[in-house]
Image (cartoon, rainbow, N blue to C red):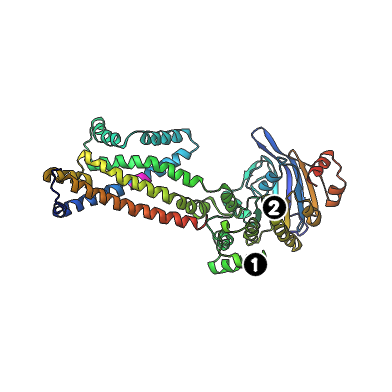
Amino acid sequence: MNDNAPMVKVEKVNKYYKDHHVLRDIEMEVRRSEVVVLIGASGSGKTTLLRCINGLETIDNGCIFVDGEPIGCWVTKDGTRCRDSERALNRKRSQIGMVFQKFNLFSHMTALENVMLALSCVKKMPQQQAREIAIEQLRNVGLQDRLSSYPSRLSGGQQQRVAIARSLAMEPKLMLFDEVTSALDPELVGEVLETMTDLARRGMTMIVVTHEMGFAREVGDRILFLHDGSILEQGTPQEILKNPKSVRTKAFLGKVL
Amino acid sequence: MNYEFSPETLWQNKLFLLEGTRTTLLITAGALGIGLLIGGIAALGKTSKHRIFSVAAGSYIEIFRNTPELVQLIWIYYCVSILVGLNMEASISCLIALGLNSGGYMAEVLRAGIQTVHSGEIEAARGLGLSKYQVTIRITLPQAIRTMIPPLVNQSIIVLKNSSLVSVLGVMDLTFRAQVVSTNTFKPIEMYTAIALIYFVLCTILSYLARLGERRLVAYR
């Protein structure tokens, strides 16, 4: 794959929930190692866009490519629309990490088992090797002494860091973060943002949906403002946060800053 | 009170009663097996997107939960024989009746167990690239089973107690044999106290198992 080719390419994507037009002609590109921050009011389509990028939601038209590969569906030269087989989509998903607002750790498994599961199930790794990688990943997020804790015994911040380790263990090409600090107590937000900042420094390509404007300013390479399913404005954090052009962007920033 | 206690009657009939205990346990186990199978099918039916299946499963559950066990037992024994013209052995029709009855309750237990699994966890697993089958085996079932064990054990206690109803149809279970002995020896107090104790011990063992299961559950909750 060409190193200059974008990691993510979204082409004219539309999505409807029945009559509700959730995504309108979305066009975006994310370069390798770029950190793109999606902002916008709730219901603006940020989360839906993120979920479409790893195929958790289907799109009604347009195309999404990750590392040159179409996700979920594509259009052939003669114009017919094809859908990914379940197996193909699973393989592509395993290369895209996603972290959720509500952590979504497997509640019947320890932190270590949470991280090991996909390694042995999807990557078919032997237990011993999966174990080593899982321990290494949990150490990277500072949880080496909580390996055998169940999620219910971990704080929100720790659970979210396990979730990040669980995604990173799969060595994804791209990480998607969906309001990962919104469900956390204020004093726990810092530890998760720190982990994400660290990840960005190591060159991970990231798409981050967040209301943490501090993070967007410090770590983001580019900010996209979504309104009503469209990308209304985009630019560097400087441009968007200091001199927003659109009235709606101004109004939104007025509320969150 | 003019009643002569004679505990030795119990001793003299111990094998007769033991055989009855065996029958009671067999009927309970059989009915639970049938109940789990039919309950599982009904749970799937009820959660199905197809209206025919969900309505059929729903009606089955409602009918068996909202009519008396004794009536179901008698109805299946007598009425089905007449309607189908099939002469079923009493023990077989009892197994079917008790199985259908417990299936109605188990369907709801199984459905609730599967639905308690947090949808976010399933999504996270899909996001990691697990197939639908792997999600079922590794995430949904382990969690659902742990949630379902205590109510299922409670259900088996109820089936064990309900099994005494089969004596009405002449199936030689523990209760029926106690009736036989007490009629022959005029010793109802000994006989019914003894079988009450046997039922009590069997049910206590089961509820102890249920509590053990619940304690396990707390490990990760």
B40 or A121, nearer to the observer: B40
> Could one spot residue B196 in this view of the protein?
yes
Cα–Cα span, label 1 and label 2: 21 Å
Residue A141 in the image: x percent, y percent? Answer: 67, 63
Residue that carries the numbered disc 2 in the rendered image? A181
Chain bearing mark 2: A
Q: Quadrant of residue B83?
A: top left
Number of residues whose C-alpha sits closer than 10 Å to that of mark 2, classed few (under 14), some (14–19) or many (20 or more): many
Residue that carries the numbered disc 1 in the rendered image? A139
Q: How many marks?
A: 2
**What amino acid type is highlighted by mark number 1?**
Arg
Q: Secondary structure at mark 2?
A: loop
Q: Main secondary structure of the magenta part?
A: helix
**What amino acid type is highlighted by mark number 2?**
Thr
* B49 is higher (above) or lower (below) than A214: above
Chain bearing mark 1: A
B186 or A158, nearer to the observer: B186
At a point 78% along the width and 47% down the height, the residue shown is A224
Q: Are marks 1 and 2 on the same chain?
A: yes
Per the image, is A191 magenta? Answer: no
> Could one spot residue A76 in this view of the protein?
no
State which tag comes first along the sequence, 1 or 2.
Answer: 1
Residue B112 in the image: x percent, y percent? Answer: 47, 44
Residue A171 in the image: x percent, y percent? Answer: 65, 61
Which region of the structure is painted magenta? B32-36
* A111 is higher (above) or lower (below) than A256: below
Describe residue B212's horizontal placement relative to residue B134 as left or right.
left
Q: Quadrant of residue A67?
A: bottom right
Q: Secondary structure at mark 1?
A: helix
Q: Give the quarter of the figure containing the N terminus of chain B.
A: top left
